[in-house]
Amino acid sequence: MENNETGCQAPPEGPVLCINNCGFFGSASTMNMCSKCHKDMVMKREQATLAATSIENIINGSSSGCEKEPVAAGTVSMQVDLPEPKIISLPSPIVSGSGETDETKAKEGPSRCSTCKKRVGLTGFKCRCGNLFCGSHRYSDKHECPFDYRTAGRDAIAKANPVVKAEKLDKI
């Protein structure tokens, strides 16, 4: 009775389905939407406002949306010509100077050993020659590694131990 006298409506009893008919239950705090639909709506709203402010900044010539620049007292009419998007077409198989095609990019599937083609997943070992190997082919002598470890070691030692020469002393 008190609700009718004051004109207030009592909240509906029981769960309320999401207004997007996704099958989940919504709440009054999320505008009768489920949490996922509410989150998606908020994200769309944020993206729309971000796009509107970025377009405004492009039109006004401002570099960032945070800085407020002083506005002139008069009205200025300006016509802005936005560049049209260009369509870039890429040639299909690109052949490099060594005769290889895009086969290296096609290997982006499951990680496999370069020697036995066994799937290695996260446990693969990357060699200094640049290839990926399984546990049995990870050592350089097992996969005929073309990397020159001897020269790399010599260069590392030469870099770590520079030649130190003292200045010559004048003889008395």
Image (cartoon, grey):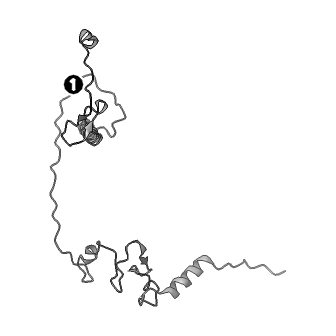
Residue 50 appears at what percent x and percent y?
28, 39
In the image, residue 92 above or below residue 13: below
Residue 80 appears at what percent x and percent y?
18, 39
Callout 1 secondary element: loop
Q: Quadrant of residue 162?
A: bottom right
Asked if residue 3 lies left or right of residue 168, the reply is left
The amino acid beneath tag 1 is Thr
Residue 104 appears at what percent x and percent y?
28, 76
Q: Which residue is mark 1?
A: 75
| Nearer the observer, 163 or 144 | 144
Q: Quadrant of the N terminus?
A: top left
Q: Quadrant of residue 70?
A: top left
Q: Quadrant of the C terminus?
A: bottom right
| Nearer the observer, 31 or 139 | 31
Residue drawn at (72%, 78%) of the image: 166
Q: Quadrant of residue 86?
A: bottom left
Residue drawn at (42%, 86%) of the image: 137
